[in-house]
Image (cartoon, helix red, strand yellow):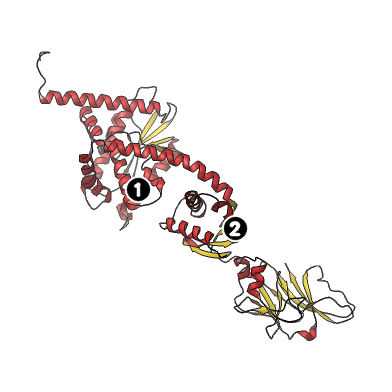
Amino acid sequence: MKNDEPLNSRELNLVYEVKWEMELSFDFTEKCRQHLLWTPSDRLLIAVSGGVDSMALLDLIQSLPDTLRPWYGVVHVNHELRTASMEEERFLKEQCRSKEIPYFSRHWDSKKHPKTGIELAARNFRYAFFKETMQVTGATHLLTAHHADDQLETILMRLVRGGQLKGMTGIQVQRPFGTGLLVRPLLHFSKEQIYTYSKTRQLDYYEDETNVDLLYTRNRYRQKITPLLKLENKQVLTHFKDFSADLSDVLFLANQVIQKKSEQILLQSKPNFYELDKKALLSCEPEVQRQVLKHILIEKVYHACPVETLRKQVEELVGLMTRTKSNAQLDLPGGWKARREYQHVYLEKNKLSHSVLLQKEEKLLLGQWVSITNGARIGLFKVEAHATSPFEKDEHIWIEPSEVILPLLIRHRKSGDRMTLKGMDRGHKKVKTILIDQKISLKAREEMLILTDSLDEIIWLLKYKESRLSIQRETDKIQYILVYQK
């Protein structure tokens, strides 16, 4: 061929392919170096299925200069979902044997396949094996062959499905995994680049026929939606890559503010119990209020597994805090409950504690104890004239025997309860009003015990208020002593 002769189309295509191969190989090496995805002293496991993406990744790792190529091995899972999977496994095993690459594989027994949700189950099985192999081999990194087209599909699917903003950033170049890191070195490269590279390098690979099966969600996006977007704009892959990077940056900065505000607002953090400063939260801008509440729900209450209705829960929590009522409560998913009590809001697991409510009224006879909660008990005893009681160091009240009709009753508050307070000669006051005046929390109101006589006259709002029936000790008389022992 003379230098002045024009290239024919076949020769021109070959030149372009070689150029693509050189560019991808060079870019790959540079990105590995610039982003410090690993060091020569690390140990890599490459997840290889036998498809074009993972075979290209394996070849690129093999082609790295010595200064960037650490120890590496291949991990493969035969999912036993297709008849071709056995042939693919043999091919890959032979490839690794001939190139002296350490090879680790496992079968997912077809008898153990679930009837539904097989995609998720397969992924869980695969990644569990990868974690196990990392630990056994001392690997520091797991490499997968996700690329720019996967990123586009993932962001689109998450936008359509809905969810938390963090998920809209799509696939990350690296994240913690197992005993090390999960890295996607091809995330900046398109499927087209990978195909061209594989063709130029004459790589052997297998095409998974299920990749065109429209029963799978990702395949519908891959076959039907993303081609249209590429027709609209040839730079769509770059734009989605930039969107992912920009959103990640913004979220990183925002999370620093949200984390700091959350620490100021979260006054108390215990297992299944969190206390929030209502006043401090409401002093923030509405946008900050929502993000702080969302952060607390995700990181504390639901432990990074947010419920689908999280946005609704945040709105309801803001509503709970801004109501005119001083006390209110709200049921949340997963057995959680939010309680507002004046300037504080409590998030707690909605389960009965040891201070469980009495199932029924309990009778209290003279000379007996009745166990209530947390090992506490209430007793009623007669004290003779001029005698002392061994219970005077406990919380107690004195009663005139002729003023009450036994047995006494121990119960919880009920609607319409009224009592004549100690120091009042006449008249009654609603128990509800008394509790509001004393700013008793809703939880404490639910658990509060009331002692009455057999005619249901209230003697004592245990731990809170005494009635007119509570008198001073008169040593020259026989009196009853009503004792609360913690």
Residue found 87% across the figure and 78% down from its top: 474
Residue found 45% across the figure and 27% down from its top: 41
Q: Which quadrant holds the N terminus?
A: top left
Q: Is residue 338 positioned above or below 8 on the image?
A: below
**Quarter holding residue 100:** top left
Q: Amino acid at mark 1?
A: Arg
Percent from the top left, x then y, of residue 432?
A: 63, 73
Find numbered disc 1 in the image and state the secondary structure of the residue it sits on: helix
Q: Which quadrant holds the C terminus?
A: bottom right
Marker count (numbered):
2
Q: Amino acid at mark 2?
A: His
Residue found 20% across the figure and 40% down from its top: 231
Percent from the top left, x then y, of residue 189?
A: 29, 33
**In the displayed structure image, the side of residue 327 where residue 31 appears, left or right:** left
Label placed on residue 123: 1
Along the line of sight, which residue is nearer the eye, 33 or 248? Answer: 248
Q: Nearer the viewer, mark 2 or mark 1?
A: 2
Find numbered disc 2 in the image and state the secondary structure of the residue it sits on: strand
Mark 1 surroundings: few (<14), some (14-19) or many (≥20) residues within 10 A: few
Is the Cβ of the residue at disc 2 closer than 8 Å to that at disc 1? no
**In the displayed structure image, the side of residue 72 where residue 91 appears, left or right:** left
Pointer 2 residue: 344
Q: Is residue 358 positioned above or below 212 on the image?
A: below
- Closer to the chain start, of discs 2 and 1, is 1
**Quarter holding residue 467:** bottom right
